[in-house]
Image (cartoon, helix red, strand yellow):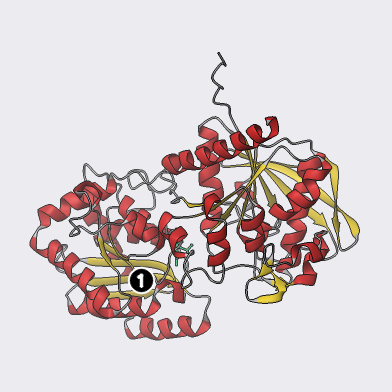
Amino acid sequence: LMPSPKRSELHVIHIAAEMAPVAKVGGLGDVVTGLGKALQKRGHLVEIVLPKYDCMQYELIRDLKALDAVVESYFDGQLFKNKIWTGTVEGLPVYFIEPHHPGNFFWRGQFYGEPDDFKRFSFFSRAALELLLQAGKKPDIIHCHDWQTAFVAPLYWDLYAPKGLNSARICFTCHNFEYQGTAPASELASCGLDVHHLNRPDRMQDNSAYDKVNPIKGAIVFSNIVTTVSPTYAQEVRTVEGGRGLHATLNFHAKKFVGILNGIDTDAWNPASDTLLKVQYTAFDTEGKAENKEALRRKLSLYSANVRQPLIGCITRLVPQKGVHLIRHALYRTLELGGQFVLLGSSPVSHIQREFEDIANQFQSHEHARLILKYDESLARLIYAASDMFIIPSIFEPCGLTQMLAMRYGSIPIVRETGGLNDSVFDVDNYTIPEQFRNGFTFLTANEQGFNNALERAFSLYKNNSELWQQLVQKVMNIDFSWDSSAILYEELYEKSVARARAANHA
Ligand code: ADP
């Protein structure tokens, strides 16, 4: 009899452009840390490789120190030295790469948005693999993320596996298919990849331009596992309408492609211990929500004689993806229905920012509406805690975190049925879904009528059945949105892939 194989621990190395909280732009940073911590807790060895940005939050890195060894990596026909730093972030071991390249790649005062991003991150992807090779690492999984480190997949198989860094399977996660990093094919040569070999329709060639390469496509083709951040989004991107030109590639590689819903950091976001709230509260005793509502009203100079007047919250980047026209409409409709409306948002798109600044000015001394156009995490926390309802009318939403954060703080989500919203919010009036899962209000059609229907049903329940509403608040606060269950799904994918590789090697 063969002994049954021991469930062994895995060595997982993430190569990423972001890691919360030291270098965070969006959800990607949260995933690297949240997934990393959850897998570490399950006994796996997790390490992270990041660029050493000048603009990181250095005070949040423990024991940062430079290693004696220098790693030389190839770029544009030459070798460049990289200084390697180590440190600990949120309990996870991190390698930081500081290139000594005259381009000062990570010395720009911002993470992304530089004209030479393709160069910066293809350089980083190669330097990260060089570090793993020279350090003699034998990871089971190398996990790369988004287009910035998508280069890792072709680099690994074409250059590094032949050099002996060959223990790993490659997992690639795309956090938003809107950003693909497409560039003229010739630029690929800088990091040592073979343009002639890769600029082909079945490899890295962009599906709509024969002289361009698409890093996301390359990672889909060359990774063993491809994931995105929710099951519904994984379906949507396989359609012509949702695929941003990659649907055919994803369908061709469908066997290795899955969607796994992100978790949230339930320690960092916990109304029972959140010191930035006026009062802490729990699902067992939600009294504190009313006090936080009063506190928010005072802070924003909103008037209300009635603590039960419903307060609607919205916290978002104001970009077309988020359904800005429906957010604006929600403000007016909420006021017509007798509610209060608070928007916290900021926009990288100047005409949207201007439009909302105009609206904010119109409402600056209104008794029932306030728009705050900046990024402010402590105000965000108070809004999650103070609001009764929370709107997310996104046009598309790969995963979305705000619906989960809102529920954790007892605010009932009103969302469009798309992407991760469709996998985490289930309409209280949808009798085809088991009662235990129903937790909010949803609509499908991305227009005012669609949104109104959901908002009006929410108002009606709130006004006419406060007992049922209260039960709903307690129910959503008790849902487990932690990383634990999602991490198990990643673990299963990793394990299956590693087992397949071992079986193939022994065949
Ligand atoms: P995306 O990554 O597309 O912006 P997510 O829902 O995945 O959307 O994540 C948004 C995160 O950013 C949430 O944690 C939310 O609280 C936060 N956030 C967005 N806008 C603001 C803001 N203006 N101030 C504070 N936090 C914000």
The residue located at (58%, 29%) in the rendering is 9
| Residue at image mark 1 | 343
**Residue 208 rendering spot, x and y as whole percentages:** 63, 76
**Disc 1 marks which amino acid?**
Leu
The front one of 182 and 121 is: 182
**Residue 491 rendering spot, x and y as whole percentages:** 52, 38
Residue farthest toward the top in the current orientation of the protein: 1
Measured along the vertical axis of the image, is residue 184 above or below residue 176? below
The residue located at (48%, 41%) in the rendering is 487
Q: Residues within 10 Å of mark 1 (few under 14, many from 20)?
A: many
The residue located at (37%, 46%) in the rendering is 481
Kindly tell me whether mark 1's CB lies below 8 Å from ligand 1: no
Q: As drawn, is 494 to the left or to the right of 381?
A: right
Measured along the vertical axis of the image, is residue 417 above or below residue 324? above
- Residue 48 appears in view: yes
The front one of 36 and 353 is: 36
